[in-house]
Amino acid sequence: MPEPVIQVRPEGLYVPAADLHIDPRRAVRRAIITHAHADHARAGHGRILASPTSRALLEHRLPGTPVSVLPWRTRHPFGKATISLHPAGHVLGSAQVRVEVDRETWVVSGDYKRQADPTCETFESVPCDTFITEATFALPVYRWPEPADVATDVLRWIRHNRDQGRSSLLLAYSLGKAQRVLAELHRHPEAQAVLGDPVVVHDAVAAINQLYRDAGIDLPPTRRIEDRPTGERRAPIVAIAPPAVDGSRWAKRLGVHDHAFVSGWMRIRGIRRRRAASRGFLLSDHADWPGLLRTIEESGARRVLVTHGRPDVLVRVLRERGVAAAPLEGPWEPAGEEG
Amino acid sequence: MEDFCRLYSDLDSTTSTSRKVSVLRAHLAKASPADAAWTVYILTGGRVRRAVRTAELRQWATELAGLEEWLFEESYATVGDLAETIALVLDLGLPGPATVEGSLTHWIEDILLPLRTEDDPVARRQRVVAAWSAQHTLGRFCFTKLLTGGLRVGVSRRLVVRALAALTGLEDDILTHRLSGGWEPTEDNWALLTATDVSSSVGARPYPFFLASALDDGPDSLTGEPSDWLVEWKWDGIRGQLVRRDDEVWIWSRGGELVTDQFPEVVEAGLKLPPGTVVDGELLAWADDGPAPFSSLQRRLQRKRVGAKLLREVPVVLLAYDLLEWAGRDIRSLPLHERRAMLDGVMRRTEGNGMRLSQALNVGSWAEAARLRAGARTARAEGLMLKARNSPYRTGRRRGDWWKWKVDPLTLDAVLIYAQAGHGRRANLHTDYTFAVRNAEGELVPIAKAYSGLTDAEIIRLDKWIRENTRERFGPVRSVAAEQVFELAFEGIRRSRRHRSGLALRFPRILRWRTDKPVSEIDTVANLENLVERLGS
Ligand SMILES: [Zn+2]
């Protein structure tokens, strides 16, 4: 039996024919990083290979590690393997990795989603023999509403808070989710009427916003909390910050405010109440249940290997549908706030 | 219904009581009388008698969503709530509208209640599917919740009363009183509930119970002398209020339920009292000349109606400790010592089978009280009650006048063997634990299940450990490596043939996570059996 094109090693996914790793969790000589989220982009690698739009984000998050760009969809020889990157639609620059060895093709999905997102490339289906997919939201209860409807709900919440004299704090992962929230709110027809002044963003979000703008992503103007005119210090505002900021000194500067978590996990009441004990809005950068099944089908893969989340459920469903599927033994990082 | 869904979502997304009160008040102010009545009924825990079997709902939702049965079960295990799981999976196969048309009353009275008399399963399915089709996800959740019994949303009866008080300008006590008992959701009852005329009479209605607070620091923290306090046993039964009015007797439990039919001997004793008398006390199983263990009372509680044999085997008494109404007059504002003196007189008319006076204990000093408390278990009591002699009979749990000074719980050390994901707020975290002790053969045998007692941080840490140390999975249950030792507290222990250990604990809960203790030091069935002997049950 020939050696598998991609293996699981203690340090992570490994391509023997190319002698490189994909999203390894320990420092390695050479790694392809699918996207700049912390659970995929670890520090200390000798060299990083990434998509054109991921590069600036990786250099920001992992200063000092050299990043080489692999242009989208271009096939590069690495040893006996041919490797190319394809948009995964998860966050700006997020890539699927296609690896071909001896005419056998494997695709590593990385994190991905199928919903339209004005702040990143759109997912592209890549035909393959073996598809390695994530399964963060692999349960039938996870199905995402239209982002425009979510924006309507968010704006209604903001308006209600303002009527009560309260600021509104949206807690969203600083890379990807925060930019998507901004963009989705601003393309809503009522955005101007409800939001008024530019949204206040936390510094962690502001830094990423800048990198998104540099990459040509159209984001509305934002401001830092210090930039509020003195006379308006008490007026209700709208702010976006990473979840860790909740309850911090920074958040206190917003004055009386309501907070809401923006995440796919908000689909489930029990999780929402545990994470936020408050309002939750359902916007995820991962594929929902129909999205996972559709993507697997479109890949045409004869075999599906499943990482992250609920591999047990997805594997069983695929097997019952006649697809050869198996969990890819981790340990994968549990999906965190970026859900 | 749309308004009600929005109310639900608003109440569910804040933990602030004052916000909930204002949201509810605003909702009730706009709602029609019928909708307002149903809203109050639902939020105070009122249940609609189950119209459809949950197995049917589960099956229909699974079919509509195009799922295999096991996938629904996996989803349910993660979500932790059946109605929520149904609402979420229906999104896969059943499109719904953006808003739900029709009033809450329409949905309950014209759609939900008639389902109860629909005997044809095919027609029943059609009706439920039609209802689901006319709702969005949140509507389906609320409707299915109501369909399966009730919809609680972290709103207490007290909070509803506060919202009603804000709406009507009436006193909390009046509203609580009007709402207590089996309040039915009708337009007329809404009018009576919110009527500003407060002179109307009350029939079977009980008074709201005054609840004692836990005295954690002992009586030295109390004001005044021991002689300012009435000391009694804290009985280990269920709280009951006997209402004797007109030609009848009603017995109310603390949960606001009528339990009259379950205690005929107490009713008989109550009939000896003059109409216009209301007595507060504790319902206890009685053996020879003292209280029987709580497990005896449980035999009575499990029956809606009791046969002659059970009546003979497990007689029940109401141990009376307060008088709330005398000669048709509400005397709750009188000081306790006056009410007690009157109660002594009243009880002379009926003392014996069915009703007895809860004796005051003679206590000269707090040290003496502490000694009594230490012997509470032998008296089949849970500890002491300390009540300020000059206090009125208040409403709800107000600190200051009534204290319960419970004996320290019994404890044991056990090892965690199974874990299961929690429900509601704890969905997705393993929060339901099964613990084991060792038997004579050295095997681990389950001794208790416990759900509470850990901090949120500990729960998260333990959840992580459980996931990493799972041995086997049986549906939502995981068996884990027997390594983590916990100290459990419990209120009682008895022999039980239904349990593998031969023992059953009462009110087990986690006291602390003993990361310092090796598994070799957990308790054994043998030393727990000794404990049963010592406590003599
Ligand atoms: Zn990610």
Image (tube, rainbow, N blue to C red):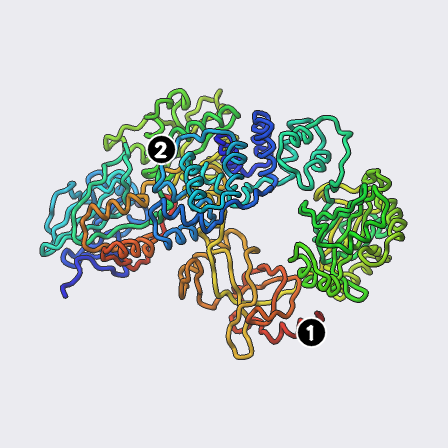
Q: Which residue is mark 1?
A: B533
Report the image quarter containing ligand 1. top left
Q: Position of residue B118 (x, y in %)?
A: 49, 43
At 74% from the left edge and 58% from the top edge, which residue is drawn?
A: B284
Distance of label 2 from label 1 (alpha carbons): 65 Å
Q: Where B171 sits versus B217, above or below? A: above
Q: Quadrant of the C terminus of chain A?
A: top left
The mark lying in front, picked from 2 and 1, is: 1
Instruction: Give the side of residue B231 with respect to residue B213, left or right.
Output: right
Q: Is mark 1 within 8 Å of ligand 1?
A: no
Taking depth in this image into account, of B49 and B365 the one nearest to the observer is B49
Do labels 2 and 1 touch, CB within 8 Å? Answer: no
Q: Position of residue B66 (x, y in %)?
A: 33, 47
Q: Position of residue B460 (x, y in %)?
A: 47, 53
Which quadrant of the structure image shows residue A183?
top left
Which quadrant of the structure image shows residue B15?
top right
Q: How many C-alpha atoms fall within 10 Å of the one at disc 1: few (<14), some, or many (≥20)? A: few
Instruction: Give the side of residue B85 with respect to residue A308, left or right.
Output: right
Instruction: Give the side of residue B170 with respect to residue A231, left or right.
Output: right
Can residue A17 be seen at all in this image of the molecule?
yes
- As drawn, which residue projects farthest toward the front? B120
Q: Amino acid at mark 1?
A: Glu
Identify the subunit bearing mark 1.
B
Q: Which residue is mark 2?
A: A181
